[in-house]
Image (cartoon, helix red, strand yellow):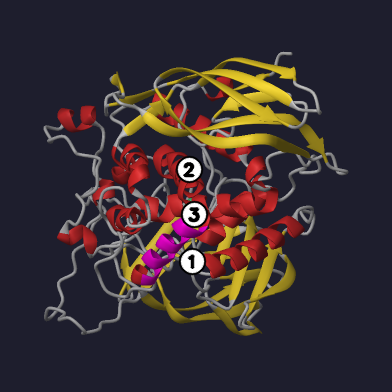
């Protein structure tokens, strides 16, 4: 093949000629010959399959790298660190293979292709899973062999391991149904073993498969898994497996993916990062919590194929990871996570080339990751973490491990959450899920004076404003803004023995603010250093940097 990679495939022992096989970006079978430009085969069965019937499809594929490629590289099969989806073709028609760009489609006389999924409650969309159209939940069993000094891993519990003809074999079997989503990993791994025990006394085995020299942050990964298992179990419902495994793969790719009880993630995600400064953003811990959360959001609750449904998977995973961070660092010390998300969202919408969807219809990663993080974090801050979690748990109880459609859409999660939001905060639900709201809050002046008895009076002038953007970015001021916004006064940071800086709020309360200037006077019982409006960046604010100011005496 022209890219240096050879694939061959056979169906029912008959070879199918293949000259090109693309695994990326979509792990679906798409091969092309001169005659067959669609990479598509239609098999006519002797008689139609009826519901409940079964048939066997036998597939043989091989993937080899016979030489060096001229451009780029192939990362699936490696000497150490293979990570492959095993070359299994996708069944059915794959619309992802169609031309997408407006220009290309025009050139070939095709109508524009909308990049939105089917609308909410669309009957086809509700009975289809977001990540694949091939199957609903499946039974999974896999025998995989590798070279003798490597360990090969696939989802499921290890049944048996043996050596035969110079190959090392592993037999994995999953005893509960999982979605049709798996990969095979093989490497010269060292393994760290630990376990987490549920409050009912059920053990979950923890295994970290790592490159021996990359042992620096294993304790962070284990801590994130244990913290996550405890929190998610308690707040969202039980973990569905008896094991969870993290596997390192080489940095030819930089992502993490959460397969059932099996989470491969790239060397890049903190395996050898230096987290010795406790004030650095600990993305190793955060990413691990996020990927673990996908065992609930993505695997227990599978999103359907309708507009915005990926927030069920990604926004809930982000929210779950943020709750773990909040638990670990305290609610006054997650601002760096929120600010990171806010910057990401603002950058994402600034470079939007088509239109920005509202959250309930989200169709871009900056919406389901970064915006989702902020608005769900903001909501638990308004209504209480337990209250929001109770709605999320009820949603999980309703859709978790569901074998039959309808599967969950963004609107389902929305409706569960809606029931726990009081009337006074319905404006926030409306703003965050159904509109594009942007605050322009800032501190104008912050002054303080001593009033004796070690007390200080702080006078803050703040400007509050909220605007609504439409899909194309045109903006108008919100009329009748009267919103709950944090006002805070802070002492100098407290520095722990290890150097970790902790925010020390002297005053932090929500004020109901209309648009315009407000003067607020606050008494505090320690010398203040800073003050601000929405100082933790819980709201989507166009300029988050001007929300805090040094206090003048
Ligand atoms: Zn994710």
Magenta-highlighted residues:
386-397
In the rendered image, residue 247, in percent from the top left (x then y), is placed at 63, 61
Q: Label 2 neighbourhood size at 10 Å, few (<14), some (14-19), many (20+)? A: many
Residue 347 position (above or below residue 100): above
In the rendered image, residue 238, in percent from the top left (x then y), is placed at 51, 74
Q: CA distance from mark 3 to mark 1?
A: 12 Å
Q: Quadrant of residue 278?
A: top right
Q: Nearer the viewer, mark 2 or mark 1?
A: 2
Q: Along the polypeptide, which appears first: circle 3 or circle 1?
A: 1
Q: Which residue has dot 3 on it?
A: 317
Q: Quadrant of residue 248?
A: bottom right
Q: CA distance from mark 2 to mark 3?
A: 15 Å
Do we see residue 101 in this rendering?
yes
Magenta stretch, main secondary structure, is helix
On whether residue 394 falls in the magenta region, the answer is: yes
In the rendered image, residue 81, in percent from the top left (x then y), is placed at 63, 58
Q: Which residue has dot 2 on it?
A: 378
Beta carbon at label 3 within 8 Å of ligand 1 = yes
Q: Along the polypeptide, which appears first: circle 2 or circle 1?
A: 1
């Amino acid at each position: 093949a022209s890219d240096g990679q050879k694939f061959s495939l056979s169906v029912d022992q008959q070879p199918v000629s293949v000259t090109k096989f693309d695994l990326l970006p979509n792990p679906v079978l798409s091969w092309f010959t001169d005659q067959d430009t669609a990479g598509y085969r239609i098999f006519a069965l002797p008689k139609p399959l009826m519901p409940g019937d079964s048939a066997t499809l036998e597939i043989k594929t091989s993937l080899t790298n016979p030489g060096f490629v001229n451009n780029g590289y192939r990362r699936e099969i490696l000497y150490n660190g293979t990570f492959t989806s095993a070359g299994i073709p996708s069944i059915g028609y794959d619309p992802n293979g169609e031309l997408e760009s407006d220009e290309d489609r025009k050139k070939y006389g095709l109508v524009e292709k909308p990049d939105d999924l089917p609308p909410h409650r669309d009957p086809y969309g509700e009975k289809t899973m977001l990540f694949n159209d091939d199957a609903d939940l499946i039974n999974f069993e896999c025998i995989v062999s590798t070279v003798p000094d490597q360990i090969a891993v696939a989802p499921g519990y290890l049944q048996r391991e043996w050596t035969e003809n110079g190959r090392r074999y592993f037999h994995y079997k999953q005893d509960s149904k999982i979605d049709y989503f798996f990969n095979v990993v093989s490497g010269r791994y060292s393994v760290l073993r630990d376990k987490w025990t549920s409050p009912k006394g059920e053990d979950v085995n923890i295994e970290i498969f790592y490159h021996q020299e990359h042992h620096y942050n294993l304790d962070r990964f284990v801590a994130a898994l244990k913290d996550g298992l405890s929190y998610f179990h308690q707040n969202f419902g039980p973990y569905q497996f008896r094991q969870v495994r993290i596997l390192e793969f080489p940095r030819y790719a930089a992502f993490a993916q959460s397969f059932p009880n099996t989470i491969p993630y790239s060397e890049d995600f903190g395996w050898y990062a230096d987290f010795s400064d406790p004030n650095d953003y600990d993305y190793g811990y955060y990413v691990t919590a996020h990927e673990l959360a996908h065992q609930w959001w993505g695997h227990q609750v599978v999103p359907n194929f309708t507009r915005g449904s990926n927030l069920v998977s990604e926004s809930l995973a982000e929210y779950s990871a943020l709750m773990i961070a909040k638990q670990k660092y305290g609610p006054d010390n997650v601002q760096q996570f929120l600010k990171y998300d806010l910057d990401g969202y603002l950058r994402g919408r600034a470079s939007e080339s088509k239109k920005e969807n509202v959250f309930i219809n989200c169709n871009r990663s900056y919406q389901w990751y970064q915006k989702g993080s902020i608005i769900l974090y903001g909501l638990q801050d308004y209504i209480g973490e337990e209250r929001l979690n109770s709605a999320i748990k009820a949603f999980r109880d309703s859709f978790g491990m569901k074998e039959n459609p309808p599967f969950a859409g963004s609107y389902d999660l929305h409706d569960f959450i809606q029931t726990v939001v009081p009337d006074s905060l319905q404006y926030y639900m409306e703003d965050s899920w159904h509109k594009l709201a942007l605050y322009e809050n800032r501190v104008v002046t912050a002054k303080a004076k001593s009033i004796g008895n070690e007390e200080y009076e702080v006078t803050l002038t703040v400007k509050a404003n909220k605007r609504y953007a439409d899909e194309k970015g045109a903006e108008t001021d919100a009329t009748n803004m009267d919103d709950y916004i944090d006002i805070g006064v802070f002492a100098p940071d407290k520095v722990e023995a290890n150097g970790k800086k902790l925010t020390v709020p002297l005053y932090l309360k929500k004020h109901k603010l209309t648009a315009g200037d407000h003067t607020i006077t606050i008494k505090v019982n320690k010398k203040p250093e800073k003050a601000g409006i929405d100082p933790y960046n819980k709201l989507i604010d166009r300029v988050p940097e001007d929300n805090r100011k040094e206090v003048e005496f």
